[in-house]
Amino acid sequence: MSNPSFSAVPFGSEPPSAAALSAPPLAELPVDWANQVRELAAERNAVILAHNYQVPEIQDIAHHVGDSLALSRIAASSDASTIVFCGVHFMAETAKILAPEKTVLIPDPDAGCSLASSIEVADVLAWKADHPDGVVVAYVNTSAAVKAEVDVCCTSSNAADVVRSIPADREIFFLPDQFLGAHVRRVTGRDIDVWAGECHVHAEISPSHLREVVAANPDTDLLVHPECGCTTTALYLTTTGDLPAERTKVLSTGGMAEYAASTKSSRVLVATETGILHQLRKAAPNTEFVPVSERAVCPYMKMITPAKLLRSLRENWFQIEVEPSIAVRAKASVERMIAIGSPSRGGE
Ligand code: 13P
Ligand code: SF4
């Protein structure tokens, strides 16, 4: 399959959405905001979920911190009547798909994802028309409308297991992340069509930059998120001896948190969005975690702030809705994802 072109919308180039323009005014953050958040959450029977890339204050106030898969699992099984999703839009949408009877809130509806916006429904339908017996695997970083058209979803922690679960004689289309797709192709040995999408934050962690950082930090462990532009290079460097294979790990953010909980290493390089460092440092205070790129900051994740979280609980804003006919079909793909692979760390 030839690599299709795509145009992820660069951050900041879009005007605020109609939803964001209708937002209740944002009050100044009170000193006791954390107590107020906890009290409101208790009153409302709400659970606060935070992705590993959220700002530290949000991670610390959340009931659960984790990666996409762990948070989806919690959303699906929680007894709370309201889920406040401190993450990006597709994550909150996934929670609503899994728990349609619950109120699902995201504190800023414009917290999007450049990777999710790199593919549209028409792109999926075009591949399916050419491959009527093929199987479409979608990374969870996709809209509900795309999820509704695919066979199964995956996250970075179970992508390879999902592909291994597909019979060997079926063609596979993996979307939308080209670096995760290449990683899955490598570890499963399957001949997979991969969509040429990318996350603008992870794509910037380039092979040349990784080589420089590794050369300057010999004998250091390396954790790499599979969305990174440098994943292939990291694995190549293990074959040339520039990186020790046993100390180089390609992991989801939840996998990184699990690694930190048991590491004995004194210094570890981390190639992913820098928000994860907070969880890693909490789990292993005696280990020095060094970002491969200080610039790897997801502007969408950082749109969620304590003031917006408080407003969300006070004003019941912004409520995620997914059109029921889309939600039903998307749910089937997401539930297949949840059933495959071992649960990753869900945080504290
Ligand atoms: P994880 O599933 O590893 O948490 O990654 C989600 C994501 O959006 C990475 O950019
Ligand atoms: Fe999307 Fe990249 Fe941000 Fe993750 S880090 S939410 S993939 S833009």
Image (cartoon, grey):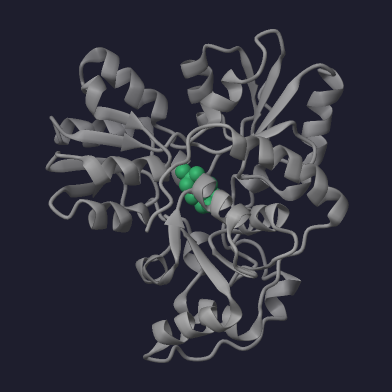
Residue 27 image point, x, y percent: 53, 91
Depth check: 116 or 66 in front? 66
Taking the view exactly as shown, the residue that stands out farthest to the front is 79
Residue 335, compared with residue 96, is above or below; it is above
- Taking the spot 37% from the left edge, 71% from the top edge, the residue there is 57
Residue at 65% x, 18% y is 166
Q: Quadrant of the C terminus?
A: bottom left
Q: Residue furthest top?
A: 169
Pick the quarter of the image with the N terminus: top right
**Quarter of the rendering containing residue 134:** top right
Camera sees residue 7: no
Image coordinates of residue 302 in percent, x first then y, are 47, 65
Q: Residue at 40% across / 72% down in the picture?
A: 61
**How far from the left and from the top, in percent, is residue 282?**
25, 58
- Left or right of 116 on screen, residue 235: left
- Say if 344 sits above or below 237 in the image: below
Front residue (pair 339, 274): 339
The image shows residue 213 at horizontal and vertical percentages of: 23, 37
Asked whether, in this view, residue 169 is left or right of residue 282, the answer is right
Q: Quick check: 341 left or right of 205?
A: right
Residue 183, above or below 75: above
